[in-house]
Amino acid sequence: MAVIQPVILAGGTGSRLWPLSRELYPKQLLQLIDQTSLLQTTLLRAAGLPDALAPVVVVGEEHRFITRTQIDELRRFGEYTILLEPVGRNTAPAICAAAEYCRLSGAEDAILLVLPADHLVRNQQRFIEVVSEAAGLAGQGAIVTFGITPQYPETGYGYIERGAGVEVLSFKEKPDRGLAEQYLAGGNYFWNSGMFAFSVQSFLAEMEKHAPEIVACMAQAVEAGERDGCFFRLDRRQMERCPSDSIDYALMEKTARAAVVAADLGWSDIGSWQALWQVLDKDDRGNVSQGDVFLYDTSNCLVRSENMLVAAVGLEDTLVVETADAVLVAPLSRSQDVKKIVEYLKREKRKEFLSHATVYRPWGSYTVLEEQRRYQMKRITVNPGAQLSLQMHHHRYEHWVVVTGTAKVTNGDAVILLHENESTYIPAGTVHRLENPGVIALELIEVQIGSYLGEDDIVRYDDAYGRQQ
């Protein structure tokens, strides 16, 4: 049997899991079930397949460094590739890019196993068995999708109508409640999992037939792409030309080669807070509590605390999620409507749509402690051996106080070392850099004062991570 090439699609945002999921820290990067993120769990699942190659992970540019960090934390992959999408174009171009990359990298005979990064699979042994079955069909030229036997009339999933054997009769849009109940009663419908298996050659041939413009654009995006270590950056101009389409619309609903395998894996796409509540362990009153939570006379609730004590009295069927900068309260049954909040935040350009109070960077992270009109306080953490860019600000002055570790500071023409309880001052217009030369994390408090404190007031002169102005 041909080797398996896992392709992990990690470009989504998971807006229905706000306020935990944000544009710059999306669902697949979160620890929702245990101490590993959904992305890490997906990578470990793929790594457990016999004779699987190192993964190809497709992400947006803005998530590249945290994705690399999470992969490296697993210490399972000596080599892997992160395909960087400069612009999002949905799943069909993303998968096409991975197929073209594999073809040009000498893996044209591989079976691509396409896995969303944000799904949960409970039964690893069954997963291995189903992938083996799908790979056998893919080796015969089939375009295989994984169908999940429906447990209830879900209206948030697409459906697959199965004919005889592995034949696919049709793909169905997300139905209303009545239609979902008909599908469930019919017995020949699956939930559409969004997982696929096909050979590189079969997939590209079918895409050429049904979506030739996508194939042409993505072939050029890969050909004109550039490698930077584990990253492979697709060409922006070609991706901007590429039509945006899902793999279902672009290919699966059109191809005559579609096949479906039954994949009863203990699967969930964790598409909402209610879906998360359904898969997590509960107390004797049906509650899921995470973090510093106290419940009294409360039943069938999901209550999650990220930073402080959350206490609830007399609640039923309710969702409460606390983060450093937002609190969500809703009936658990209305958790699909959380996306309406995200749409509002995006429309109003609220920062709560974009990021958390803690923002991750390739060198570490910063947390906004207080923000006022002309000043801002941050806690900055710099990883051992890491450095910020050599930069300058036009509109703000900065005061740095070291809390733990050692800081190497470039401040204009001077280079100094600062230790615990020592400080320095960076005037506006001064070229500066912060480095951690030590072996433990550097933590410092930064106080910014000025007429404009936005993150876009940075002029970069040199950056170890290839970031531009």
Image: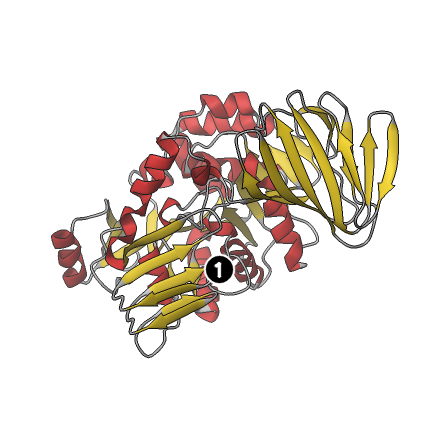
Horizontal placement of 82 versus 246: left or right? right
On-image quarter of the C terminus: top right
Q: Is residue 254 above or below residue 450?
A: below
| Residue carrying label 1 | 308
User: Farthest residue toward the bottom?
Assistant: 284
The answer to whether residue 158 is visible is yes
For residue 210, which quarter of the picture?
Answer: top left
- Residue at 87% x, 37% y is 416
Task: Please indicate, yes or no, whether residue 252 appears anywhere in the rendered image.
Answer: no
Q: Amino acid at mark 1?
A: Met
Q: Residue 276, located in which quarter of the rendered image? A: bottom left
The foreground one among 164 and 48 is: 48
- Name the residue: 28% across, 50% down: 336
Asked if residue 293 lies left or right of residue 414, the reply is left
Residue 334 in the image: x percent, y percent? 25, 53
In the rendered view, would you say 373 is above or below 257? above
Q: Residue at x 37, y 68 (%)?
A: 288
Report helix, strand or loop for mark 1. loop
